[in-house]
Image (cartoon, coloured by chain):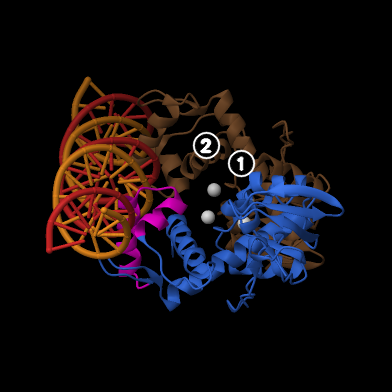
Chain colours: A blue, B brown, C red, D orange
Amino acid sequence: MLTQTEENYLKALFTLTETEEGKTEAGTNELAAVLNVKPATANDMLKKLKEKKLISYEKYGKISLMAAGRKLAVEIVRKHRLWETFLYEKLEFTWDEVHEVAEQLEHIHSPKLIEKLEKFLDYPQLDPHGDVIPNAKGEMKMPVRKTLAQLPVGKTCKLVAVKDNSASFLQYVVQVGLGLSSKIKVVTRQSFDGSLEIEVNGRRSSVSQKFAENLYVV
Amino acid sequence: MLTQTEENYLKALFTLTETEEGKTEAGTNELAAVLNVKPATANDMLKKLKEKKLISYEKYGKISLMAAGRKLAVEIVRKHRLWETFLYEKLEFTWDEVHEVAEQLEHIHSPKLIEKLEKFLDYPQLDPHGDVIPNAKGEMKMPVRKTLAQLPVGKTCKLVAVKDNSASFLQYVVQVGLGLSSKIKVVTRQSFDGSLEIEVNGRRSSVSQKFAENLYVV
DNA sequence: AAATATTGTTAGACTAGTCTAACTTATTAT
DNA sequence: ATAATAAGTTAGACTAGTCTAACAATATTT
Ligand SMILES: [Mn+2]
Ligand SMILES: [Mn+2]
Ligand SMILES: [Mn+2]
Ligand SMILES: [Mn+2]
């Protein structure tokens, strides 16, 4: 069985190699950065995960998940998102509070628990941030999503998910009047820094490009 | 903050020093035994817990919890029992399945989670094994309980709690026709080995003294 | 093509938690 | 009161996970 640490490395590799459009490999420094460890530390773990045949990796080469590693990573993601849904739907947590606790809960080992939890929640499809919850077989349709930053001026769209799950980002989102399913109109875009003027429920706000890149819309 | 391991040592000391009637101190070997580690290992941890002022302990002396350590231990017990109640009441776990998973869940750190969980469960007083759930302030009335092994022949009593939480014991209890609130009549007791003939719902069974010692009755 | 910057690796050290083997202290029995 | 047994401690070793500092390989810029 995997340690919590190993699980976290696999999950990080999953998001690093399958969340970004067109990216399928990751690097040591990059991985170390998202896990808040030094590259030397990540390097040690990469050797171990390679030894366990969970990742494919050669010295000085790029890193990618092997089938077994990907399967485990998806299981953690599934647990994380089911727990987030539980906290949000049943325990009255707000969407900016769920992620941190789910980071712990995702490491509880009990197939029965997840099965029962999913049933209790009535087989939810999306977590509180609009992310797809993988099913028990590890299947997960990756929706093609674009970000608000890519939307042309004048267009109106609907917020379907958020990329960043941190409390500070999510609180800012709420502050601007946004939530899942909100309608957003792009009023202007500054070519200088990509910042946007947006309209939500008749309310105008100016937001940075970085902010817009963390909102998925259709 | 405490590690999971430290939490497990404190919890073990709590049950060792406050569950048994009249016992207020524990020994190194005894502690090691319940935690499934060697005495040498427990000895190292005792030094650390003493250093943190969570236990009172002198070389070659007896071990007991200090106020701060006891408080932390009770918090873990509270979390353990609330999670067991959740699994049993909301997720359809059977009473022999809850303990193992709760052993993991009890180490999740989030005051808000426990507060919300308790509310969601509507402030339960007892867990699925009949044990008292400490309240948010760490208060917990210790019920005076006797075991079935102490009951005189001919008397009838009610099962209010089980001491052993292991799946194998609990499954045996069910097999004999018992559950919380069951009425039990002691028909005979062998003075040779303390084994009992009991009657539950008109059904006779013969059980060992060890078995009877793990059933709390009134 | 060199020089520079970035990225990745190694070696050595540290902490937490565990073990075995040897030893010491305390308790119990004779 | 000794001897035998049980309980407890120490020393040294090992694994997992982390770090810093030095070094090596690769990628980018000029
Ligand atoms: Mn999340
Ligand atoms: Mn995690
Ligand atoms: Mn239990
Ligand atoms: Mn535990």
Residue range (magenta) = A28-53
Quarter assignment of residue C12? top left
Q: Amino acid at mark 2?
A: Leu
Image mark 1: chain: B
Residue lying at the far right in this picture: please name it: A202
The one of D15 and D20 positioned closer to us in this rendering: D20
Q: Position of residue B32 (x, y in %)?
A: 42, 43
Q: Position of residue A158 (x, y in %)?
A: 77, 65
Instruction: Work out whether residue B55 can be spotted.
Output: yes
Q: CA distance from mark 2 to mark 1?
A: 9 Å
Q: Amino acid at mark 1?
A: Ile
The one of A197 and B216 positioned closer to us in this rendering: A197
- Residue occupying image coordinates x 76% and y 44%: A175
Query: In the displayed structure, does residue A90 sit left or right of residue C15?
Result: right
Question: Dot 1: within a 10 Å radius of its alpha carbon, few (fewer than 14), some, or many (20 or more) residues?
Answer: many
- Judging from the image, what secondary structure is the residue with disc 2 in? helix
Report ligand 1 position as a quadrant.
bottom right
- Residue occupying image coordinates x 55% and y 40%: B11
Query: In the displayed structure, does residue A180 sit left or right of residue B13?
Result: right
- Residue occupying image coordinates x 35% and y 48%: A38
Label 1 near ligand 4 (CB < 8 Å): yes
Q: Position of residue B202 (x, y in %)?
A: 81, 67
Q: List the residue tagged with mark 2.
A: B10
Say if B24 sits above or below A63 in the image.
Answer: above
Residue B11 magenta-highlighted: no
Q: List the residue tagged with mark 1.
A: B76
